[in-house]
Amino acid sequence: MCLEKWLKPYKSYAWLPLRFVLAAVFIYHGYGKLFAEPGIGGFTGMLSGLGVPSPGIMAVVVALIEFAGGILMLLGLFTRYVAVLQTAVMLVAIVTFHWAKGFNFMTGGWEFNFVLIGGLLAILLHGPGIWNLEKKLLHRE
């Protein structure tokens, strides 16, 4: 039996792994910024050192986009809006921190952010896929 033919009934599930992986990454990093040591204060200090304006406000905004946005992505709720916000966060992270370190993530470069942006853009273009709260609660396809 051809692999393509065997997998065809499961095609509508293809977006679930991508959505769940992105959600896990953003929840993990957002949680770290909000609750793990050194917490939001440490993240604020880092942003301040990078010259980010209003670092205290920006630290909270970024951490919430990552953490709460990750939860929304996991649930399949407002996924396209979340994808836009998380893409913006990743682009700012690349410009302010990772770009100068090159591409390789092993040296602090922007490779990992680039991969996340690719997944986020796929979700933005396609939507949440099957099993999402947008369809159930908001009657969106």
Image (tube, rainbow, N blue to C red):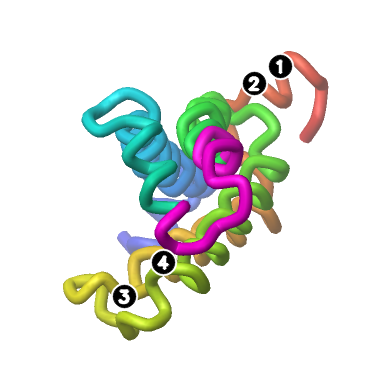
Q: Position of residue 6 (x, y in %)?
A: 38, 52
Residue depth check, mark 3 versus mark 4: number of the one nearer the observer: 3
Mark seen at residue 109: 3
Look at 38% across and 82% down and name the residue there.
Answer: 100
Label 2 crowd (10 A; few <14 / some 14-19 / many >=20) = some
Closer to the chain start, of discs 1 and 4, is: 4
Q: Is label 4 in a helix, a strand or a loop?
A: helix
Secondary structure type for disc 1: helix
* Local SS, label 3: loop
Disc nearest the viewer among 4 and 2: 4
Q: Are marks 2 and 1 in contact (CB under 8 Å)?
A: yes
Magenta residue check for 49 = yes
Q: Position of residue 81 (x, y in %)?
A: 71, 42
User: In terms of secondary structure, where does tag 2 sit?
Assistant: helix
Residue type indicated by callout 3: Gly
Q: Is residue 15 left or right of residue 128?
A: left
Quadrant that contains the N terminus: bottom left
Identify which amino acid the numbered label 2 is placed on.
Answer: Leu
Q: Tag 4: Cα neighbours inside 10 Å, few (<14), some, or many (≥20)? A: few
Q: Which residue is mark 1?
A: 136
**Quadrant of the image containing the C terminus:** top right
